[in-house]
Amino acid sequence: MMFTIVSVLVVVFALTVIWFLKEALKGPKRTLEQLHRPISDLLSREFDGGFLIIEHSKTGRFIQFSKYTKSKGKFGIELAFPKADWSKDYYSRVKDICENFDLNVREDFSAGEGELTFLFADFDKDVDSAFEFSKTVFKDVFKINKTDKVHVRLRNATATA
């Protein structure tokens, strides 16, 4: 009997640790009003190709920004929004918001594991616009509550420049 209780406790502990690790890998949780800093961090970090994923904690819906560098002093941030199974119902609304924000927009196809169309929107160095855009997409397109949390993951970026 004691062995069974210990076994159950070990399993529960292991599952709890796995759950916490999985959550930690998603990145810290923020409110929509706290997104300005991570977007600014993406732009200020040195690595070309660094990216920021902002994912709604409850639904998994996300947007992604990446940093690009064209030449010395010519860099910015760009949205890459996929037209995937989960996002196809949101794609045209996100595109409309890009146009409302007067962004340079292009669509491109990506070959790989399944071909996807991506919507790219160039924010140049305008962190404020990317911040307002993010809030608009999450509130008006994904219909999340203002108080909901999003996971924020900054990847492939070196220390602040």
Image (cartoon, grey):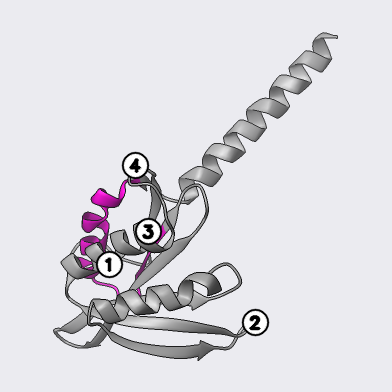
Q: Quadrant of the C terminus?
A: bottom left
Are discs 1 and 4 less than 8 Å apart at CB? no
**Measuring 41% from the left and 50% from the top, which residue is drawn there?**
27
**Which label lies toward us, 1 or 2?**
1
Q: Quadrant of the N terminus?
A: top right
**Which label lies toward us, 2 or 3?**
3
**Dot 2 corresponds to which residue?**
114
Instruction: Read off the magenta span.
Output: 30-54
Q: Nearer the viewer, residue 31 or 99?
A: 99
Q: Sequence-wise, which precedes: disc 3 or disc 4?
A: 3
Which structural element holds mark 3? helix
Are discs 3 and 1 less than 8 Å apart at CB? no
Query: Around disc 4, counting alpha carbons within 10 Å, would you say few (fewer than 14), some (14 to 19), or many (20 or more)?
Result: few
User: Is residue 85 found inside the magenta-colored segment of the image?
Assistant: no
**Residue 85: x, y in percent?**
61, 72
Determine the CA span between mark 4 and mark 2: 35 Å
Determine the CA span between mark 3 and mark 1: 9 Å
Three-letter code, disc 1 = Phe
In this rendering, the answer to whether 80 lies above or below 19 is below
Which mark is drawn over residue 147? 4
Q: Sequence-wise, which precedes: disc 3 or disc 1?
A: 1
Three-letter code, disc 4 = Thr
Which structural element holds mark 4? loop
Determine the CA span between mark 3 and mark 4: 11 Å
Three-letter code, disc 2 = Gly
**Dot 3 corresponds to which residue?**
138
**Measuring 20% from the left and 63% from the top, which residue is drawn there?**
40
**Residue 64: x, y in percent?**
39, 68
